[in-house]
Image (cartoon, helix red, strand yellow):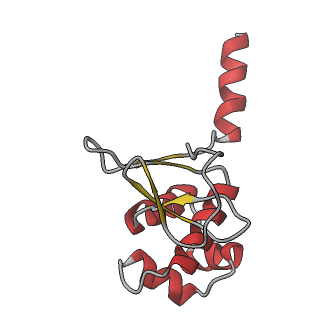
Amino acid sequence: MINASIPMHSAPIVDKGIALHNRPGQCPLMAVSWKLLRGARLMLGLSQEELAKASGVGRASIDRLERGLARTIRVTDAVQRALEARGVKFIAASKDSAGGVLLPPDPAESAKAEVQDRA
């Protein structure tokens, strides 16, 4: 979780050893690996084209990002924000973990669980 009291900066900042980056007027983002961004897209069932449209960057930029090439803060920010807008939560890396992804609940699975709970 990002600390809301972190001041807004236009340059990269570090909080407790986790690299964060942001743009003026936006909440800081933690630096998420390309592998987590790609994994989140795939787990949501989005194509690169769909993510490109949602994030406002080109499909070729997403392809390069997902292969670990030409990583720019602008593209990474846009992709991360688009995935977070769909309910994805990224878990920061630590000394014991490479980080991770939490997906939003699947509405169909939630409804199914409610029906089973009533039975």
Question: Is 75 above or below relative to 34?
Answer: below
- Side of 8 where 17 appears, left or right: left
Quarter holding the N terminus? top right
> Residue 38 lies in what quarter of the image?
bottom left
Q: Residue at x 42, y 75 (%)?
A: 66
Q: Residue at x 31, y 51 (%)?
A: 98
Question: Is 46 above or below relative to 49?
Answer: above
Quarter holding the C terminus? top right
The residue lying toward the viewer, choosing from 18 and 35, is: 18
The residue lying toward the viewer, choosing from 97 and 10, is: 10
Q: How many marks?
A: 0
The residue lying toward the viewer, choosing from 11 and 101, is: 11
Q: Position of residue 48 (x, y in %)?
A: 56, 76
Q: Residue furthest left?
A: 96
Q: Position of residue 52 (x, y in %)?
A: 63, 79
Q: Residue at x 41, y 68 (%)?
A: 34
Q: Position of residue 2 (x, y in %)?
A: 57, 47
Q: Position of residue 43 (x, y in %)?
A: 51, 55
Q: Residue at x 25, y 41 (%)?
A: 96
Question: Is 13 above or below relative to 75?
Answer: above
